[in-house]
Image (cartoon, helix red, strand yellow):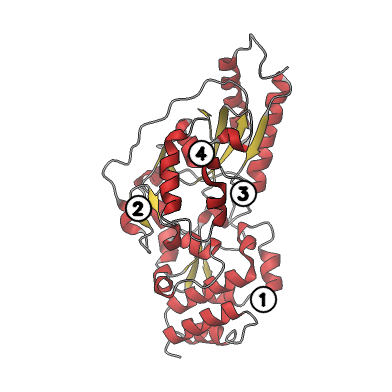
Amino acid sequence: MSAAETGRDYTALARAIKVWGRELGFQAVGIADADLGSAEAGLAHWLAAGFHGEMDYMARHGMKRARPAELHPGTIRVITVRMDYRPEAAEGWSVIHAPEKAYIARYATGRDYHKLLRSRLAQLAQRIEREIGAFGHRVYTDSAPVLEVELAAKSGLGWRGKHTLLLSRDAGSYFFLGEIYTDLPLPADAPVKNHCGSCSKCLDICPTGAIVAPYRVDARRCISYLTIELKGPIPLELRPLIGNRVYGCDDCQLACPWNRYAQTSGEPDFRVRHGLDDVQLVELFAWNESRFRERMAGSAIRRIGYERWSRNLAVGLGNAPTGADVVAALQARAEDPSALVREHVAWALRRHGI
């Protein structure tokens, strides 16, 4: 059977897809139409302002992000999914406020989510195919120029918060999003109301002032960008503001009142590995590259490589309280083979008066 088949009850199919999605471990499933024309002006202005920093692929893809049918021809609907990831981990603020410890964004303390989400989305597509036969579709999990939040909001999974993340009344923002672009003429779900109101906690808490206005983030100042996407030196003026955040940042989520409703995930892949939710900076900085590769196998952190990981930890140690262990850890890598690491270690040592 094909998507063009006449007489099919697509309303019933949409209901079934949502049931199958929940059976596969998604906490919510929605359906959006593929018209993102209203998002094009905002995307163009964001790119023109240079807020994407060194993420050149953002500019290369241009408006393709806002035109699903250009990315996957024939797309008229997008099935969107939400999978909660909040692990049972040390309380976020308690680690951030302990400057001798390393703070790692909670989504990255377990296994890399990409393979899990992609596999589950593929299983959902296969389940649909078993029901109706072959149909046009493509699965995405943060793997292509997709306006994930825009599509999820259109499909009723939540609303865009002022920090630009999707927010849900019953799940906060600790979740991953994924999509299936399809040619099935499924009934689209209605968007939900924005419930941020006059709250500005996420803007007020951002350590580097990256949320330059409601719903507008300058990635060049965002700690997630600086510690993950940026390949070269971290700007000097931003290093002290990063504190002990060595991979990503959760401050805007920790401050958001809606995250009081976030649920702990039951997915085994999202459980904390190797104590990464509550670990000393000195301990992590002592890892050699082999240990890094071993410990970070299957982790999103491995993607940035040992050099950037070390760079980030050097910044964290530069912001840590001065102590013999901190100074010794930095001095042990003062002649690191990497010029990038050496420069950040030298900066950190100067912060400790050495």
Does 10 appear above or below 298? above
Q: CA distance from mark 4 to mark 2?
A: 26 Å
Badge 1 marks a residue whose secondary structure is loop
- Identify residue for label 4: 66
Q: Nearer the viewer, residue 64 or 253?
A: 64
- Identify residue for label 3: 113
Q: Are marks 1 and 4 in contact (CB under 8 Å)?
A: no
Q: CA distance from mark 3 to mark 4?
A: 24 Å
Q: Are marks 3 and 4 in contact (CB under 8 Å)?
A: no
Badge 4 marks a residue whose secondary structure is helix
Residue 67, picture quadrant: top right
**216 sits to left or right of 180:** left
Upstream in the sequence, badge 2 or badge 3?
3
Comparing labels 1 and 4, the label whose residue is closer to the camera? 4
Is disc 1 surrounded by few (<14), some (14 to 19) or many (20+) residues within 10 Å?
A: few
Upstream in the sequence, badge 4 or badge 2?
4
Upstream in the sequence, badge 1 or badge 2?
2
Is disc 2 surrounded by few (<14), some (14 to 19) or many (20+) residues within 10 Å?
A: many
Q: Are marks 4 and 2 in contact (CB under 8 Å)?
A: no
> Residue 224's spot in the image, x, y percent?
49, 59
> Residue 44's spot in the image, x, y percent?
44, 46
> Residue 51's spot in the image, x, y percent?
44, 56
Q: Which mark is residue 260?
A: none
Q: CA distance from mark 1 to mark 3?
A: 25 Å
- Identify residue for label 2: 202
Q: Which mark is residue 288?
A: 1
Amino acid at pointer 4? Ala
Residue drawn at x 50%, y 58% as measured from the top left: 105
